Amino acid sequence: MLECRGLSKVYCRGFEQGRRYAFVDILRPGRRSIDRLRREEFLAVDRFSVTVRKGENVLVLGLPGAGKTTIAKLLTGMLLADAGDVQFRGRLGLVSGGKLGMVPFLTVWEFIQLATGIHGAEPTVHDACCERALELTGLSDRRDLKIVDLDKGDTRYLSIASALVVPHDVRIFDGVPRSGSDRVSRQVAALATEHLERGSNLILASSTANLPTRIAHAAILHEGETLFEGGLESVVPVFDHFVYRMQRIEQLVREAAETGQDVDSSRMLSPPEIIARARRSLERSRIGPVVEERIAEAWRSTRPIVVGPYLSDVGFELLYWRPFVAWMSQRFGKRTAPVIAVSRGRVGDWYAGIATHYVDVCDLVDFDSFLTRNRQRVRATGSWKQKVVADFDRELLELVSARFDGAESEVLHPSLIFRVCNRIWNATMPHGWLEEHGAYERFEPAPPPEGAGLPEGPYIAASFWFSSCFGDTRPHRHLINLALSELSQRLPVVVVDTGGFPGVPESLEATGNIRVLPGPEQSEAQLGLHSRVIARARAYVGTFGNISQLAPFYRVPSLLLFDEDGGLTAHHRRTSQSIAEVMDDSAIDVVPAPELNPARLSAWIDQALS
Amino acid sequence: MLLCLRDFRYRYRQAFLKYVWAFARPLLAVAPLILVGNAFGLGGDMSAAEYALFALSGFLMWQMFWDAVISPQWIARRLRRTCVDGPLRPEAMVAAGAGLVVFNAFFYGALFVIAYALTTSWPPVTLPLGLLALPVIVLGGLTVGAFFLPLTFVYLDFRFGLPLLSPLLLWTAPIIYTAPESGVLSVINRWNPLTYLINIPRGWLVVGAGPQDGWFLVCAGVFVVLAGLMLRYYRRAVPLAVQSLPQR
């Protein structure tokens, strides 16, 4: 068991002053005190206490500079505490990113011997630890090479691997090793995960990514002070909210400095105030477990499940709703009773494989009624997004039920995910919830679009519109024209008009190489048609959002443009990034509009078409 | 041991002549001293060969003491990043310094044997006592070195200034000259602990027992106590010194 009580550490802000104090303190003990801070001194760690029991993980979250590394150094005796005490029996290890002053003239074997020695490898297991570290870093066959003769990339994980292979009773992780794209980083991260899952660790982290599943206790540290502690389920959302707010305050201060204006003091909350607000908000909303319980309950029943009706924006359906429905079927498995997906626009292709039946809204009501009633729904609920079950939804659900012989069914309405997202966008729930509750997988191949009058050979799909993240400005219009011009020089272009396409310039129209498909309000099957057009394209270029989110699910290389990262774009971009990471074979490039020039566009097209 | 090896590789792998330097350095340092000492009669009544053995043995023992003072600094200087990055025990730096002294001691021993052969002298029966005294000399040097080590982390002045102490220590003890009967130097010699720490074991190695041998035990006792106190100071001072280093 590792236990520390009231651990404090005094630091000095100025380097020169710090050296002067160090010199005096070395020669005259007793000068340094947490109660009598000298000029430029501050408490880097203020009365920190923690207990790590055998088999338990304890998590301390904090922004960079919160005091995490100092705590790690105090616990391992690398620094001397100015107050408090540490009690530990056994072997205590430190896993951090430090390179341990790698000497280039040592051979790989010598360095690993030294590094494992510093990390406390006992003589009886020392050589075995070194062999394991070599194996982990893939350097077994190069053990006699000098460090100076190795590629820099090969030496990157030597130190951390050396820390991980040494047996310890309790480990302190100063940061959690993340898995990269290369084999060595994956192996190192896997070993770290193995230790983390086994327990007996103190994890000091600045993000909530890659955390182990079992954490007995968690705390938030800021400027050396413990602001909040509790269970993982409460600390993580509070921390995510805290990070978001702190970044926002930083942004406000930066903007104020640039514009020379005063910062609105009402928005400059202190860290404890932010934590207090996040806690209140968290207590109000325990939406995540409620949603999960609702789904589990529906899945347990023997009645049909209706997922929908989905009537809202396409981008949201693709990024959140459809992956959420896919996650449900993955998480809870196949059922004997049917799962009926209800949506609009004849997009049954999207639900193939995750729902046993697809019912289109226009099978239930005619297209014009759908458009009218949906607008009424938006007016009545005050939002385009389906945050509540509206009257129109209820009517549609009754009609679905009637189609299935009036059988009573379990309904999983899109408001489930909209309510969760609302919390996430307000930063009172971690964004990671969406990644944990979304199955990002490739869609089943779509049949060819019929009646679209498409070119016979390969083509490029495009879709441009103006939005809050891609405003109607002269440079953006110029960019659209440039993109259409570049694309049409390579292959025929099919523009999918989602309702805001500014039109093909006359100069390009004359080439006859660009065809525009009208918007989804033209006919009940238009959205499905758009979907199939994109699914069969060689490449896709368009504004970020809406139907543009579709291309990666069909493995169509896509270039998505945005400008302003305001509103919800940052959240959507993060989800988009997660999709790119999870779906190895998808190629999504989300590019800020000002960064796209003809050369870059041309290079992207070359790569996409190759 | 590993730290010692690390320093070793670092130092000699960059040199063309490699380990030849370990042998050449003390030899090149002491040769002019012997020549000049003989010319100026620093050995008193001793013959040239006797003086050569006297000066060489004294210098090599003093060099062991000095190596013990300076080696931990060398090691520590190159371990600054390691101290910042990893859980390195402070005592390891002093232990590695002692390792370097032991390594050098093999070369000094070889030189000593060669000197015996060249001067056709036979070691006295007190030789084992002289050998047993060597660890005490090293302990004395390490005690002084451990005091300066944390300070060199904070200010390099101590590292730059420490070599200046070397000639002072060499010439204030009768190491390459016979102790004068009277005068200022005689008083300085008498009050300098190095006189007893080096001269008496040197006597055991070269000429045999002497009337002042008991002082060595007193000196050894003082250094053992000092070493204990220094260890307490050192364990407290090194983390403070590491804290003053740039942490990134």
Image (cartoon, coloured by chain):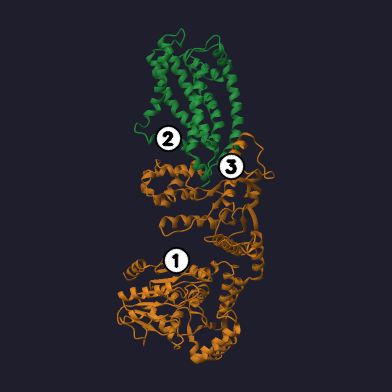
Chain colours: A orange, B green
x%, y% of residue A260?
57, 61
**Depth-wise, is mark 3 or mark 2 nearer the camera?**
3
Determine the secondary structure under disc 3.
Answer: helix
User: Who comes first in sequence, dot 1 or dot 3?
Assistant: 3
Residue that extends furthest to the right in the rendered view of this protein: A35
For this rendering, which residue is in front, A474 or A536?
A: A474
Asked if marks 2 and 1 fall on the same chain, the answer is no
> Which residue position holds label 2?
B8
The quarter holding residue A289 reads bottom right
Q: In this rendering, is residue A87 above or below B97?
A: below
Whether pointer 2 and pointer 1 mark residues with C-beta atoms closer than 8 Å, the reply is: no
x%, y% of residue A424?
57, 70
The quarter holding residue A494 reads bottom left
Q: Relative to A464, is A37 on the left or the right?
A: right
> Which residue position holds label 3?
A18
Q: Relative to A182, is A243 on the left or the right?
A: right
Q: Relative to A230, is B5 on the left or the right?
A: left
CA–CA distance between discs 3 and 2?
Answer: 32 Å
Q: Chain of mark 2?
A: B
Query: Mark 1: few, some, or many residues within 10 Å (few <14, many ≥20)?
Result: some
CA–CA distance between discs 2 and 1?
Answer: 46 Å
Q: Amino acid at mark 1?
A: Glu
Determine the secondary structure under disc 1.
Answer: helix
Q: Amino acid at mark 2?
A: Phe
Query: Mark 2: few, some, or many residues within 10 Å (few <14, many ≥20)?
Result: some
Q: In this rendering, is residue A36 above or below A575?
A: above
